[in-house]
Image: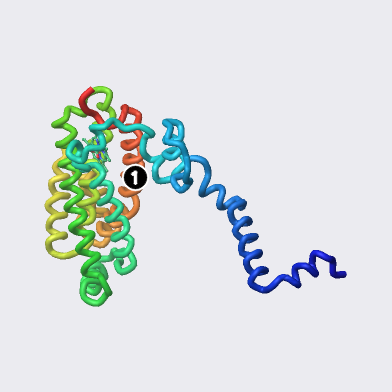
């Protein structure tokens, strides 16, 4: 049965009815849970918020991206010329290497019979293959360089001294892991350079006192370099070492915050 209100609605001209439903839709959106969780107090999108220390803290703490940073930072710590962003660059390169590495994994099989051909096909027949391979290779060289320069910067500023000595040790582990990632990746193209570099490297490790032969056997997955070595180094390169380095990076970043932020003049 039609009511008076329905009759009124029907009698309204079409533009008026459209305008009403649009404003109803607007009210529904603004009062929805999704809207309120985006434009909540402290949100960077919320207008007309008073600029107080408390609200500034809200802005940082309530944003996924911002909460990675401390609510307050010392003025010198945000100067690019202090850290040269070398730690940040190392991290950026690690992300770049992860993304480009996943791309390469789509085209690469870690067997002595397929590896070299796969790289060859990747470079010559896959769209952007050469570009992504080179990004991965140059990125790896650059990461070794930035990690090393970052360590030099930390040393130059004396940032290895208490209370940051624990983070320095974590850093040394990160440097080792970075070098191991670089070295395990070196074998994967399975070309002459890779083969002989790894032969020399593992021969050197074979001279470890007391259990040198065992170390060499574990690294090679046999008595000489072959398809088992390739599989072993591949798994280390794409899975185990990245997994371990991510854990140590998380500890490293957490410690930077816990040690009172970046070092600097007191
Ligand atoms: C994968 C390698 C590494 C990554 C991604 C990394 C990342 C970072 C980042 C983002 C910071 C904040 C300040 C900055 O950007 O300089 C930092 C600080 C620090 N890093 Fe690293 N780092 C790495 C390796 C190392 C190494 C090899 C060392 C030393 C052996 C080290 C020791 C430290 C110390 C002591 C700090 C505190 C510096 C300060 O307070 O001035 N890190 N790291």
Q: Quadrant of residue 25?
A: bottom right
Q: Residues within 10 Å of mark 1 (few under 14, many from 20)?
A: some
Judge from the rendering whether residue 11 lies leftward or rightward of residue 253; answer left or right: right
Q: Residue furthest bottom?
A: 125
Q: Quadrant of residue 87?
A: top left
For the point 25% across and 67% down, the residue is 115
Determine which residue is flagged by label 1: 246
Residue 220 lies, in percent from the top left, at 23, 53
For the point 13% across and 64% down, the residue is 192
For the point 31% across and 44% down, the residue is 245
Residue 156 lies, in percent from the top left, at 13, 31
Frontmost residue, 105 versus 147:
147
* Residue 247 sits above or below residue 33 on the image: above
For the point 28% across and 30% down, the residue is 74
Judge from the rendering whether residue 36 lies leftward or rightward of residue 253; answer left or right: right
Q: Looking at the figure, which quarter contains the C terminus?
A: top left
* Residue 161 sits above or below residue 85 on the image: above
* Residue 94 sits above or below residue 53 on the image: below
Q: Looking at the figure, which quarter contains the N terminus?
A: bottom right
Frontmost residue, 220 versus 114:
114
Circle 1 SS class = helix
Residue 254 lies, in percent from the top left, at 35, 35
Q: Quadrant of residue 223?
A: bottom left
- Is residue 210 in sight in this rendering? no
- Is residue 166 in sight in this rendering? yes
Frontmost residue, 53 versus 266:
53
Judge from the rendering whether residue 199 lies leftward or rightward of residue 17; answer left or right: left
Q: Residue furthest right?
A: 1
């Amino acid at each position: 049965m039609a009511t008076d209100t329905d009759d009124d609605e029907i009698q309204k001209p079409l533009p008026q009815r459209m305008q009403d439903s649009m404003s109803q839709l607007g009210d529904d959106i603004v009062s929805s849970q999704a809207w309120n969780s985006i434009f909540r107090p402290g949100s960077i999108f919320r207008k007309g918020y008073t600029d107080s220390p408390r609200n500034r803290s809200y802005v940082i703490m309530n944003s996924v991206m911002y909460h990675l940073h401390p609510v307050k930072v010392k003025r010198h710590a945000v100067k690019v010329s202090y850290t040269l962003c070398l730690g940040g660059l190392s991290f950026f390169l690690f992300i770049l290497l992860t993304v480009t590495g996943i791309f390469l994994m789509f085209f690469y099989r870690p067997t002595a019979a397929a590896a070299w051909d796969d790289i060859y096909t990747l470079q010559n027949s896959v769209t952007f293959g050469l570009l992504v391979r080179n990004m991965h290779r140059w990125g790896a060289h650059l990461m070794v360089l930035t990690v090393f320069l970052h360590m030099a910067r930390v040393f130059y500023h004396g940032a290895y001294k208490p209370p940051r000595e624990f983070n320095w040790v974590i850093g040394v582990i990160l440097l080792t892991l970075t070098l191991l990632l670089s070295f395990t990746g070196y074998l994967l193209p399975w070309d002459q350079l890779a083969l002989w570099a790894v032969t020399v490297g593992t021969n050197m490790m074979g001279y470890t006192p007391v259990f040198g032969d065992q170390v060499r056997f574990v690294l090679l997955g046999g008595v000489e370099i072959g398809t088992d070595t390739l599989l072993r180094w591949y798994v280390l390169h794409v899975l185990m070492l990245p997994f371990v380095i991510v854990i140590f990076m998380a500890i490293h970043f957490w410690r930077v915050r816990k040690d009172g932020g970046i070092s600097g003049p007191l």
